[in-house]
Image (cartoon, grey):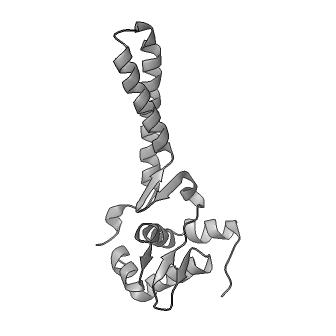
Amino acid sequence: MRIHTDVKDLEKEVAGEYNTFRTYVYMLKAKRVSVREVQRALGFSSPALAAHHLQKLQNFGLVTKDRYGIYHVVPKNFGILKFFVVTGRWIVPYTIIVAAMFATMTIGFLICLPQHECLIWAFIVSVIGLIISVYQTTQFYKLLPKEDSYKK
């Protein structure tokens, strides 16, 4: 089996193909699954369809298959996944770090405002930054396949 290494092919064939990308995102969360588990979780009409998407991922080196037929994920950043960090079962956009910084600054300035009224502008800027970063974080989450699209 030849593994495709071309980034453009990866972006087109995996990130650009909804069900294959959904399968990969599910694999990132599950870590290891069988064909039937993918079929049930993603609501595919047959195990053959799940196997097709897993085979496509395997061709790109995104999953490996052991001798028992269990697929194991190989985490890689490509497409929109470049904007996310995968930690355990969580896939979190990097913008959440910026949102946390602005939230900390906002709380800090709010605490300091009674003693230092000149900090009002810093407080306003931190609130605006917080709003923008929270908005961007929610927009990134909307790019990922929805959790409710996985049938449990």
Q: Which of 20 and 111 is in front in this view?
A: 111
Name above or below for residue 30 compared with residue 127.
below
Image coordinates of residue 74 in percent, x first then y, are 55, 71
Q: Residue at x 51, y 54 (%)?
A: 84
29 vs 53: above or below = above
Q: Who's the residue at 36% across and 20% down the image?
A: 110
- Furthest-right residue in view? 6
Q: Which residue lies furthest to the left in this view?
A: 152
Front residue of 116 and 48: 116
Q: Which of 106 and 5 is in front in this view?
A: 106
Locate residue 20 relative to residue 79 in the image: left or right: left
Rendered position, 101 above or below 93:
above
Q: Residue drawn 33% across and 79% down?
A: 40
Front residue of 65 and 129: 65
* In this picture, residue 5 sits left or right of residue 53: right
Q: Quadrant of the C terminus?
A: bottom left
The residue most toward the bottom is 67
Quadrant in which the N terminus is drawn = bottom right
**Quarter where residue 116 is shown:** top left
Residue 65 at x, y percent in the picture: 52, 85
- Marker count (numbered): 0
**Residue 16 appears in the picture as rendered:** no
Q: Is residue 61 visible?
A: yes
